[in-house]
Image (cartoon, grey):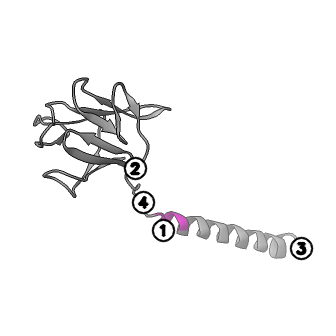
Amino acid sequence: MIQIEILTGTRAGTRCEARRLPFRIGREKTAALSLADDGIWESHLELSHRPGDGYYLTARPDSLSLVNGDPVKKAVRLANGDLLEAGSVQLRFGLAATRRTAMVWREVLVWTGVALLCLGQIALIYFVLP
């Protein structure tokens, strides 16, 4: 899951998770991440995923958008920890930690099955085969 951390601006210090792609960042209310800071266009940035290739950032052609200090002219491939700049706002692109489900009961059942199988083999060797 993608995580966007807002570093500067009115919403500095907050994080937003991108649960659906494409993920739009801009001033409009329908954007997944709505920012009202200076230099932000209605539809400023868009994050998308290309299967087998990674995550990409596309910016409105006439907007001020940078990735690690380089201007965004076309779709740019993103890496974990990249610094994005949209207008006067700095954002950090990252991959959120995955949520692990509890596997305790599954592990208990597997080990119980292994123990029963071993006991069954021992019983077969000592009681059935002699």
Mark whose residue sits in front, 4 or 3? 4
Which sits earlier in the primary sequence, circle 2 or circle 1?
2
Q: Which mark is residue 81?
A: 2
Residue type pointed to by label 1: Val
Q: Which residue is mark 1?
A: 104
Q: Position of residue 53 (x, y in %)?
A: 48, 32
Q: Which residue is mark 3?
A: 130
Q: Which residue is mark 4?
A: 101
Q: Residue 47: which quarter of the image?
A: top left
Q: Position of residue 32 (x, y in %)?
A: 20, 39
Q: Which mark is residue 118?
A: none
Mark whose residue sits in front, 1 or 3? 1
Which sits earlier in the primary sequence, circle 1 or circle 3?
1
Q: CA distance from mark 3 to mark 2?
A: 66 Å
On screen, residue 127 versus residue 72, left or right, reads right
Please identify the quadrant where the C terminus is shown: bottom right
Q: At numbered mark 4, what does the secondary structure look like: helix, strand or loop?
A: loop
Residue type pointed to by label 4: Thr
Q: Residue at x 36, y 24 (%)?
A: 74
Q: Position of residue 57 (x, y in %)?
A: 34, 33
Q: CA distance from mark 1 to mark 3?
A: 39 Å
On screen, residue 34 versus residue 100, left or right, reads left
The magenta segment:
103-107
Q: Residues within 10 Å of mark 2 (few under 14, many from 20)?
A: some
